[in-house]
Image (spheres, rainbow, N blue to C red):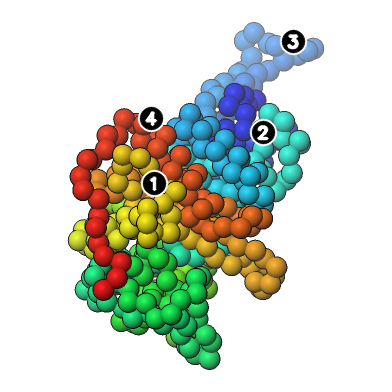
Amino acid sequence: MRDYPAHDVGANLVGLMGQDGPLAGMEVNFDHWLAGKDGEEEFMRSGGNRLPLGESSITRPVNGRDLTLTIDRDLQWYASRLLRRQVAATGSLSGVAAVMDVQTGEVLAFVDYPTFDPVAPTQSRDSDRGSRGLSDVYEPGSVQKVLTAAALLNENLVSPTTPIRVPGSLSRGGRVLHDWFEHGTLRLTMTGVLSKSSNIGTVLAADRLPALELRRYLTEFGLGGRTGSGANNETAGLLPAPSQWTQLTKDRIAFGQSVSVNALQMTAAVNAVANDGVYVPPSLIVGKATTNDGRAVGTSTVDAHRVVSKRAARQTAQMMERVLDPVAGTAPVAAVPGYRVAGKTGTAQRAVNRSYVGGGTVVSFAGFAPADKPRFTVYVVLNRPRVTGGGGSLAGPIFADLMAHTLMRYGVPPTRTRPSQLPFEW
């Protein structure tokens, strides 16, 4: 018997029990842990009556064990209502929002919409009884540029002020690359390339890093593998094998296409930059628990590792701050008044049946705050919005609201330090 007092809040992770067993979520993945064992009693009887002095034995029942999620239920509720409102306002097919503790990797909120109510599951579609944020993959778009920039900085191949001459178009491997905005030749710094989200500038900068070195960094950031969060339906994403990395493939991956992720993967990847370059696997389980297939997961099993240096991570964060610049940035609406915020927009074509034709876009915004002393990483994704806009204008406002609420809820004060003033141009 199960009681779901929060109804749809957290249902995408908790799952539900059916009449004959668990049907989704943690209920499935930890059924052995939760269920315990029935007890039994054997005795002799005659004529329907138990023989008082007959042989008997008792096997005591074993209670199931508790399973506690890292989810902050009130924050999960707030995030779910924000996301539901924006999915409806933009006509999106679906959306995901995540909040992650920078240092511990605890996932404080992970929201999908549409979702379901486990008290009345038949009132929702089967496809809503799970977590698209864990099971569905998509191309991350320009949020990926954060990882590319961090790798280049770590290898000392660029600095935030490295000058890059960005033409209006770039011919590569028989294809012509364009930016999302029309322009002539631009004189951008590396900071300007990131903040203005130039595909061409990113490709030119990434030329300094061998393809397989970029792939190694992305693997260290968690792409191409499951996070080990404890969820049962998490995909590993799609990171091309080394043999598939042509020059054109590398170019596209550098700015966020030809690679696919799930929302939790990308949250954790950006969080590594927030955490001074250390990747902390995201956790959905408090303490330690064992899945049905014998894997130990939870906050006490986390094995963190360094991806980039503290210097490279902090330089990347300073560059990301300029994305929210009120004059020249691409996402001023993602700012949180009073706080230094580092962020990055993402807009990618959405593939359907191996084609981008008619697929629409996936828009997103990822960031952390305070930028100079990060406490939380927040990531918002909208799948195929039907209104005009990109990651900054559509996902940015939800990021700002959710980040502001989280900072206030946990009593995180502004750092009151001077924001990044890195130049856009040279």
User: Is residue 129 in view?
Assistant: yes
Q: Quadrant of residue 40?
A: top right
Q: Earlier in the sequence, mark 1 or mark 3?
A: 3
Q: Earlier in the sequence, mark 4 or mark 2?
A: 2
In this rendered view, identify the residue nearer to me: 313 or 363.
363
Q: Which residue is mark 2?
A: 117
Query: Which comes before the other along the chain, label 4 or label 1?
Result: 1
Q: Which dot, 3 or 4, sits closer to the camera?
A: 4
- Residue pointed to by mark 4: 409
- The Cα–Cα distance between marks 2 and 3, rounded to whole angstroms, is 47 Å
Mark 4 vs mark 1: in front = 1
Q: Are marks 1 and 3 in contact (CB under 8 Å)?
A: no
The answer to the question of whether label 3 and label 4 lie on touching residues, with beta carbons closer than 8 A, is no
- Picture coordinates of residue 231, whole percent (x, y): 52, 47
Distance of mark 1 from mark 3, alpha carbons?
Answer: 76 Å
Give the structural element (helix, strand or loop) at label 1: loop
Extreme-top residue of the structure: 52
Q: Amino acid at mark 4?
A: Arg
User: Comparing marks 2 and 3, which lies closer to the viewer?
Assistant: 2
Task: Estimate how packed mark 4 is, as few (under 14), some (14 to 19) or many (20 or more) residues with alpha carbons within 10 Å.
Answer: few
Q: Residue furthest bottom?
A: 174
Q: Which residue is mark 1?
A: 335
Marks 4 and 2, how far apart at CA: 26 Å
Whole-percent x, y for residue 30 in the image: 54, 40
Instruction: Tell me how far mark 4 sits from mark 1, CA to CA.
Output: 18 Å
Q: Earlier in the sequence, mark 2 or mark 1?
A: 2
Residue to which mark 3 is pinned: 49
